Image (tube, rainbow, N blue to C red):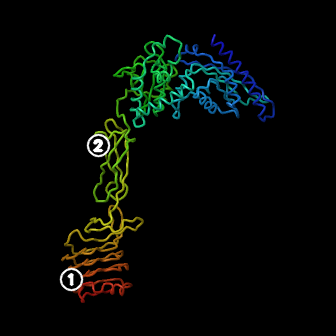
């Protein structure tokens, strides 16, 4: 009787829709007058529990429909099929019991109505927890009627009225949304790996939801819903599976609800994606158990579960491939969400530089070598170094942090046979160093280069430090680079064998006291022709004997 009433009511609604659409058509600028004609009907019933469609109470929705139409629901241009499906999906999410869509002509009207419904309930990479299977398995039944709109014999589109009976209303779904958010937050899923998310959600459902045996003997359809499972803690298999789907999808784990049979009765379970494969889960049969039998199983390890035909096709299995092996429990937490402290800039030493960091995740301080390992990249030379944390044990994934390695002003570094003191750590070619001396005090020949590369950074050698070669009794020859501006006091003091000094370039402008005191009495200092007079004055009375010759 209730089904016949639904069909009769649908007829009234279609006629009402036709009248309202005629009013709408008057506002459209067509050359001819628009004609409308009811052309097709379509009925969809939840395939898992088709008998439940008879128990869904019909509501007085005629006035609701009129209010929707007066508010402009669906008004405007005819939509593409995808646009119409999106419109219907949005209305389904908001639990509209009557939905009105306008769609461009596309094939058989009845098939068009079905296509829009299928697309509205489809699952893809952008599907949220409130869409896809969550709509499909909270919908008891759907009746639809389409009206064809023509102008001068040319079909311009269809208006379709969908009358839907959901197991829940918008108020209940708003409660589910709020509580799912709270529970997922309390479970800390944002910090967990995909496995950790699935395990936490499955544990929560198996611990907090009991099978609704009492509901089996009554006409209540709440037992099929995530709402009853989450808010009241009781449901049948469809409610378990709906809740897992909703929570897992909201946590970012691709999931499907699979209808079929198990233990001789209609049944529903889930598949969830970890890595490249999906795995079977049945929280209904595992509820209340300490040791799970149906958690993340392959098809071969998931006995007594037979899918409905539409979910067992080759195409479906290609789209949602189940792993040939059951999942082996791995890490629960994702290291990428950890907070890292203690990473500091380092001063170049010529050796590998390391850090002593602290990692915290969810308020827990992690332990090196138990929870993670550390490796480094580019941690010797000046520049940006990387420290890479790799999860271990209950933690997986990687986390990368960087730190700077810089030269320290005033620090002395050994490069080859010489020691250099950094005087300017500037960038863009402004870095500078002073030659501070030789590694060995017994060298016989010294070459002050124009530049030196320290830790991969090129610095100009602009000075020779005071006392740089003081009392080196073997030093006999010195070549001073063109970038040198200053020679410090007593730089060559006491180098009694120093016979030849060549000063290149024209930048030298300061020479310290007693720089050449005690050098070989007949030594020669050679300078450029263009600076001969300048340098002869600059080098005068720097401790050298009067017999020392300055020449071009």
Quadrant location of the N terminus in the rendered image: top right
Residue placed most toward the observer, 288 or 86: 288
| Residue 47 visible to an observer of this rendering | yes
Where's residue 172, x and y in %?
54, 25
Give the Cα separation between the discs numbered 1 and 2: 60 Å
Say which quadrant the C terminus sits in: bottom left
Residue shown at 54%/26% (left/top)?
173
Corner quadrant of residue 530:
bottom left
- Numbered disc 2: secondary structure: loop
Residue 54 position, x and y percent, is 58, 13
Rate crowding at label 1 as few (under 14), some (14 to 19) or many (20 or more) other CA atoms within 10 Å: many
x and y percentages locating residue 242 in the rendered image:
49, 24
Tally of marks: 2
Residue 432: x and y, percent?
35, 69
Q: Which residue is mark 1?
A: 518
Residue 103, can we see it?
A: no
Q: In which quadrant of the rendered view does residue 461 lie?
A: bottom left
Q: Which mark is residue 312?
A: none
Closer-to-camera residue (148/234): 234
What element does badge 1 sit on? loop
Judge by depth and name the residue closer to the eye, 433 or 357: 357
User: What label does residue 368 carry, if any?
Assistant: 2
Residue lying at the far bottom of the rendered structure: 546
Q: Is residue 358 above or below residue 195?
A: below
Q: Mark 1 or mark 2, which has the lower sequence index?
A: 2
Q: Height in image: 407 above or below 390?
A: below
Residue projecting furthest to the right: 32
């Amino acid at each position: 009787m209730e089904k016949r009433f639904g069909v009769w009511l649908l007829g009234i609604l279609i006629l009402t829709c036709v009248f309202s659409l005629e009013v709408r058509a008057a506002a459209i600028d067509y050359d001819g007058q628009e004609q409308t004609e009811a052309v097709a009907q379509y009925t969809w019933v939840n395939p898992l529990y088709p008998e439940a469609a008879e128990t869904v109470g019909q509501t007085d929705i005629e006035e609701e429909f009129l209010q929707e139409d007066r508010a402009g629901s669906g008004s405007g241009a005819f939509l593409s099929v995808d646009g119409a499906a999106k419109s219907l999906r949005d209305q389904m999410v908001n639990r509209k019991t009557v939905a009105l869509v306008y769609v461009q002509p596309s094939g058989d009207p009845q098939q068009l109505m079905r296509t829009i419904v299928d697309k509205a309930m489809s699952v893809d990479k952008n599907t949220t927890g409130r869409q896809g299977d969550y709509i499909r398995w909270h919908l008891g039944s759907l009746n639809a009627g389409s009206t064809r709109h023509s102008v001068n014999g040319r079909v311009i589109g269809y208006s379709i009225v969908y009358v839907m009976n959901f197991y829940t209303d918008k108020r209940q779904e708003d409660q589910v949304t709020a509580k799912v958010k709270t529970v997922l937050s309390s479970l800390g899923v944002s910090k967990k790996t995909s496995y950790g998310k699935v395990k936490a959600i499955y544990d929560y459902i198996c611990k907090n939801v009991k099978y609704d045996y009492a509901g089996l003997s009554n006409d209540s359809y709440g037992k099929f819903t995530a709402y009853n499972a989450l808010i009241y803690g009781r449901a049948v298999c469809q409610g378990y599976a709906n809740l897992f789907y909703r929570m897992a999808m909201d946590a970012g784990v691709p999931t499907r609800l699979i209808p079929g049979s198990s233990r001789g009765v209609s049944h529903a379970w889930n598949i969830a994606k970890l890595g490249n494969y999906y795995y079977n889960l049945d929280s209904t049969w595992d509820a209340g158990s300490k040791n799970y039998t149906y958690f993340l199983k392959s098809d071969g390890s998931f006995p007594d579960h037979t899918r409905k035909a539409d979910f067992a096709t080759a195409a479906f299995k290609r789209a949602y491939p189940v792993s040939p092996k059951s999942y082996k429990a791995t890490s629960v937490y994702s290291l990428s969400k950890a907070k890292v402290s203690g990473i500091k800039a380092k001063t170049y030493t010529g050796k590998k530089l390391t850090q002593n960091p602290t990692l915290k995740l969810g308020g827990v301080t992690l332990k090196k070598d138990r929870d993670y390992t550390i490796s480094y990249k580019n941690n010797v030379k000046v520049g940006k170094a990387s420290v890479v944390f790799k999860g271990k044990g209950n933690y997986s994934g990687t986390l990368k942090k960087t730190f700077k390695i810089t030269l320290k002003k005033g620090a002395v570094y050994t490069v080859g046979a010489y020691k250099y003191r950094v005087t300017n750590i500037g960038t863009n070619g402004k870095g500078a160093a002073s030659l501070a001396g030789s590694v060995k005090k017994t060298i016989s020949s010294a070459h002050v280069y124009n530049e030196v590369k320290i830790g991969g950074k090129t610095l100009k050698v602009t000075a020779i430090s005071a006392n740089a070669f003081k009392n080196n009794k073997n030093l006999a020859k010195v070549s001073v680079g063109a970038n040198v501006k200053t020679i410090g006091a007593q730089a060559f003091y006491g180098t009694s064998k120093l016979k030849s000094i060549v000063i290149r370039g024209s930048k030298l402008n300061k020479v310290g006291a007693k720089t050449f005191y005690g050098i070989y009495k007949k030594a020669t200092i050679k300078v450029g022709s263009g600076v001969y007079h300048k340098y002869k004055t600059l080098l005068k009375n720097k401790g050298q004997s009067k017999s020392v010759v300055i020449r071009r």
